[in-house]
Image (cartoon, rainbow, N blue to C red):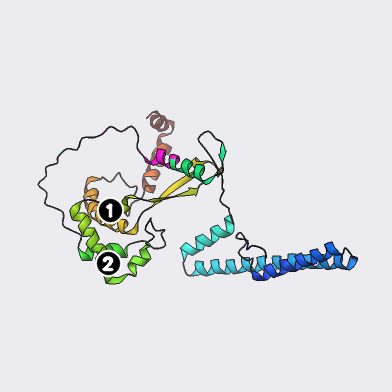
């Protein structure tokens, strides 16, 4: 039996049966190369090619109808995912890589060591002198613990369809867990809040490499994404919701990037207007900065 080809979604059991017929016709022609067996083999080959073309056309037609349906119902996520699948097609992952010297390595241990060294140089800060921890005296009262209402609001805002962290617990699982799961996670977060110490599992993340463009054997052609645990995201979102009001008071109107209901488009437009009105003089001033 032939193996199912991963890069052709339309390749099913029926296609396997037709390939077996072609194989059987070829074996008969090898054993008896008569004209009748030659004609039979050619006919089977034409039938196989015709069947594969029809399968491919039917698959593309169904894919286009699915894209049209997602576009009509404003299912943007599945729409762009389907467009990328049709546009890019199957792109197999490479099983080799290049080390620091540029030599190709194929064994898994060497490739894993190369990725470890690469991300260690990018993510870890080297050469930073040890900073002496100083006592901070403040009259601000202690920050209250996260309430049950605040905790539930953060869970509702968790994004779905996100890859889980090292614990393999997704946001959908926590949302569907009900009061029992929510109560236990809330107790855990309150304990961490009072002890002011994170769990060791929350300090670990799974780094996934995503190819950008260029040579797939070079590590610098990839960007890494750290997958954090979903329970850690709950605590970080609680902290973020409490810090945002203070940050809004400190930041001025000149800061628009990564702020809600703001965009750097207006700033870019203003800079372009200034450049058009002042001409080369303003360009020279900016280039000299």
Q: Front-most of 281 and 205? A: 205
Extreme-left residue of the structure: 139
Image quarter (top left, top right, bottom left or bottom right) of the N terminus: bottom right
Question: Residue at point 18% right, 55% down?
Answer: 194
In the image, residue 184 lies at what x, y percent? 25, 65
- 119 inside magenta stretch: yes
Q: Secondary structure at mark 2?
A: helix
Q: Which residue is mark 2?
A: 182
Please identify, in this view, whether the residue under mark 1 or under mark 2 is nearer the observer. Answer: 1
Residue 109 left/right relative to 28? left
Label 1 vs 2, first from the N-terminus: 2
Q: Mark 1 Cα within 10 Å, few/some/many (few <14, many 20+)?
A: few
Residue under the image location 37 percent in, 66 percent down: 172
Location of residue 77 in the rendering, given as x and y in whole percent from the top left corner: 46, 62
Name the quadrant of the C terminus: top left
In the image shown, does 186 or 3 lie closer to the viewer? 3
Residue displayed at 82% across by 66% down: 28
Q: Closest to the observer: 149 or 268?
A: 149
C-alpha distance separating marks 1 and 2 = 18 Å
Residue 70 in picture, x, y percent from top left? 50, 67
Task: Report whether residue 46 is seen.
Answer: no
Q: How many marks?
A: 2
Q: Is residue 81 left or right of 143 when viewed as pictured?
A: right
SS at mark 1 in the image = loop
Residue 289 magenta-highlighted: no
Q: Is residue 98 left or right of residue 39?
A: left
Mark 2, other Cα within 10 Å: few <14 / some 14–19 / many ≥20: some
* Residue 66 appearing in the image: yes
Q: Which mark is residue 199?
A: 1
**Residue 240 drawn above or below residue 216:** below
**Magenta stretch, residue numbers:** 117-130
Q: Quadrant of residue 132?
A: top left
């Amino acid at each position: 039996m032939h193996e199912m080809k991963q890069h052709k979604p339309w390749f099913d059991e029926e296609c396997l049966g037709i390939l077996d017929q072609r194989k059987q016709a070829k074996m008969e022609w090898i054993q008896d190369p008569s004209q009748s067996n030659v004609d039979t083999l050619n006919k089977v080959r034409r039938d196989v090619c015709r069947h594969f073309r029809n399968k491919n056309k039917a698959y593309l037609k169904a894919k286009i109808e699915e894209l049209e349906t997602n576009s009509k119902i404003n299912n943007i996520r599945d729409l762009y995912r389907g467009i990328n699948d049709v546009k890019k097609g199957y792109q197999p992952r490479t099983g080799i890589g290049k080390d620091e010297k540029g030599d190709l390595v194929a064994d898994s241990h060497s490739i894993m060591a190369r990725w470890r060294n690469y991300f260690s140089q990018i993510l870890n800060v080297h050469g930073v002198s040890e900073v002496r921890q100083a006592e901070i005296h403040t009259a601000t009262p202690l920050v209250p613990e996260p309430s049950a209402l605040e905790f539930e609001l953060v869970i509702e805002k968790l994004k779905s369809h996100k890859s889980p962290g090292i614990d393999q617990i997704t946001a959908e699982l926590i949302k569907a867990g009900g009061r029992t799961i929510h109560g236990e996670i809330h107790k855990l977060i309150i304990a961490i809040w009072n002890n002011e110490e994170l769990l060791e599992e929350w300090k670990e993340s799974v780094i996934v490499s995503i190819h950008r463009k260029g040579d797939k054997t070079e590590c610098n052609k990839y960007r890494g994404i750290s997958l954090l645990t979903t329970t850690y995201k709950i605590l970080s979102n609680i902290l973020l919701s409490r810090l945002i009001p203070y940050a809004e008071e400190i930041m001025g109107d000149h800061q628009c990037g990564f702020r809600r209901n703001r965009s750097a488009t207006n700033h870019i437009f203003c800079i372009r207007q200034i450049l058009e009105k002042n001409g080369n003089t303003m360009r020279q001033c900016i280039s000299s900065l």
